[in-house]
Amino acid sequence: MKSKNTKFLRKLVFLYSTIIVTILITGVYLYNLSIDNVSKEIKAQNRFMLEKTIQDMDSSLRRMEILAGQMVENSNIVYLANQPTNRVRDFYLKAYHAMDDLSVYGLTQATLPINDAYIYLNKPDFFLSSSIFQNSYFFYVQKYDLPYYDNFMELVNNSDVYYQFLPIDNYKRSDASAFLYMLPLDNYTVQNIPASLCFEVDHQQLSEIFSELNLYQEGFIFVTDQDNQPVFTISNAPIDETIKSELLNLHDAQGLSEASMNNVEMLITNSQSSFNNWNYFLVQPKDASLYSLYQYRNIFFTILGISLLVSAFILLFLSRTNMKRFTQLGTELENTLSHQERLQELVENQKPLIMDTYLHKIIEGNISRDEELAYAQEYLDIPSKDQKFAILHLVIYLSQYELQVDNSMVTGPDTLHHKEIIEEALSDYFNDPPYILSLNEREYTLLLSCDPEALDHESTQYIKKQFIAFHDDLVKSHSIWAFAGLGDWNEGLMPTWKSYQQAKQAISYTTKKTPIKSYISLEEKSPGFYYPIELTRQLTNFVTAGNTSQILEIFEIIRHENMEVRSLPIHMIQYLLTDIRNTLFKIRFDIKDSDEQAEALQIIDSLFDQHMSLKLCEDLALHLGKLFEKKTSSNELIKTIKDYIDENFEDPSLCLNKIADEFPISESYFSYLFKEEMGVNFSSYLERKRMERAIELLKSTTLTIQEIYQQIGYNSSHTFRRVFKKIYGMSPNQARKEL
């Protein structure tokens, strides 16, 4: 009996030991799988944050270019830039007006990572900003160290360094690091403007753009331009030049890699800007960035070792050991679910920012297509049924501001919670609910709606009544003063930009006794014509989008404002028509000539030569809009052909002639459209697709080189090997050995 019990015990121990070993092996596999998944998520999050930061950086650079585009519209700046000397008539008078004009861009400049912005006028050798107009010597002495004056002037006169970040630490009197970023104004107009817009980019503010990226102690951000030349670096400590050299030689299609730098393992995340093709490298210590994984790994191996020792006493500790394994699996599941909840929370936190972005695009008129407008309307939860919309634009005066109104001084409250107070009051008095956009602490823009059957003047009176109650409540309870302008009501969301412009005009007529003005009640007394920069931008957007209805709406506004409200004299009408013609001419200048569009472009060019009238300008805009509408259709055709190429690239007979037979398009026009849409020509794209498939076959199969090149669409091994070496820098056999 004792012998039988011993054998049974051995069998039982063997059975339970087998179960324990199986469970341990399964646990190790699941652990490795979980570690890989979490590691991929961490790397993907790093890449997402890097790309988001690149978008913020690109946004700042775009705003700089927008400023340059606005500068070239200023006739005073154009006049000053083309004067060879300051001893011409009206030179300083024009400069005074130009300085006054530049002051309106102060708010835009405040949102950029810069210390200062100024225009360098090459011919007269003067520097111009909203606060300074001096010749180069006095300007330099005021800002920088005198011994480097000649070097600085050589720098600002060098056209080869445009669109680059140029270190200017040697010129500055302070220790703060900065760069010079110059934009040639000639590139933003058809006129001759020998001048450059200069931005002094502050390194500290530049670092704040990348503040969301965790560099730890030894990490850094390294940026190169499209020529693989260093642009700038953000780090907590000096970086060895050999490390920068290693990054310049790094090429990783996935954007994720690892490398050893100064005996430290680094995790490298890189991405390219779609705006200027700059390469951004996020370099982090691998141990620090993946610290949670290593810590978890040590704990896991410790538990695993203890479990192996405990397995010798399986009969005594079986239940506890199994329970521990299930507990570990449950903890892993809870961690995964918790991570998903955090991701969902991050998405929800970003939702208000996205909503503000869509609302801002609607109000500014930056949405020109009905499909995009419908998506934004659905995202903002604006009712899709027919409604009328208007804009109410408010300006708030707080304790740090003072305003002289009707010989009385208006002073706001001394409180840190005015934003919450104002937004809560807006929600109380303007329901349905109001869509509120606050670009700064002093200005609020509300998108209001009403029933389409309601009369405009009744809806306007109701809004005025609500605003007066809102205004009186703020003044009485919090000593906050508010002034507002109300635009006209429009059917649908597309013309909301018009109401926004009207509201901003109306607010200029408010007083202490009349804190709200509606556009419809204004009596226009301006002697000048109505064609603001915002209307120029919106006309350009709608023409290039092919939006015929909004093109007609803009010309109706121009006609109403200039020929009915203002009743302009003939010479002012001519000035207006000249400005409109210049806007349309710039759009025409951006269209590349092609055989398919030759007839339409010939008609448009002939219209430019005719006597200008508002009707002729409207016809020009409609003709241009039709061209861009056709271009959109051509883009859809190219996408269809691309899908066809992706499915049939292994066909040896695939060529330009076959595509011309399959689709109603000529070979030359297809080549032009494909390069315009895809950025590469047809043959290069086809080669790249075939080579990607060749790499897959070399890596995952044992097919011969002859079988591979025949399978991917080549008829000659010589052609296949030549193309393979051109793209990958090695022969197919060498690639197979290294893969």
Image: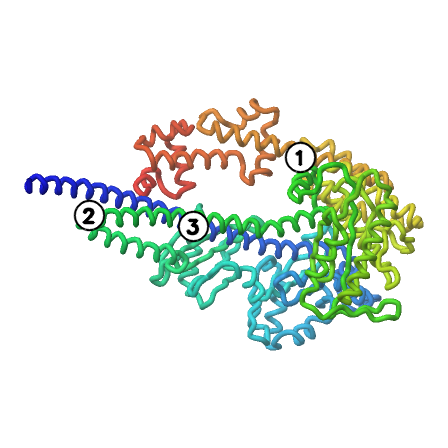
Q: Which of marks 1 and 3 is in front?
A: 3
The percent coordinates of residue 325 (x first, y second) are 30, 48
At horizontal 82% and vertical 61% (from top left) the residue drawn is: 472
- Name the residue type under label 3: Leu
Q: Which quadrant holds residue 557? A: top right
In the rendered view of the protein, which quadrant contains the N terminus? top left
Residue placed under numbered mark 2 in the picture: 314
At horizontal 68% and vertical 33% (from top left) the residue drawn is: 630
- Name the residue type under label 1: Lys
Q: Which quadrant holds residue 419? A: bottom right
Q: Is residue 554 left or right of residue 186?
A: right
Residues at marks 2 and 1, CA–CA distance in whole angstroms:
75 Å
Residues at marks 1 and 3, CA–CA distance in whole angstroms:
37 Å
SS type, badge 1:
helix
Q: How is the image coloured?
A: rainbow
At horizontal 36% and vertical 63% (from top left) the residue drawn is: 262
Identify which residue, 709 or 553, lies in the foreground.
553
Residue placed under numbered mark 1 in the picture: 631
Residue 132 visible here: no
Q: What crowding class fits label 2: few (fewer than 14 Cα within 10 Å), some (14-19), or many (20 or more)?
A: many
Identify which residue, 254 or 193, lies in the foreground.
254
The percent coordinates of residue 432 (x first, y second) are 74, 46
The percent coordinates of residue 282 (x first, y second) are 46, 56
SS type, badge 3:
strand
Identify which residue, 319 or 705, lies in the foreground.
319
Q: Which of marks 3 and 2 is in front?
A: 2
Mark found first going from the N terminus, 2 or 1: 2
SS type, badge 2:
helix
Residue 645 visible here: yes
Mark found first going from the N terminus, 3 or 2: 3
The percent coordinates of residue 340 (x first, y second) are 47, 47
Residue placed under numbered mark 3 in the picture: 256
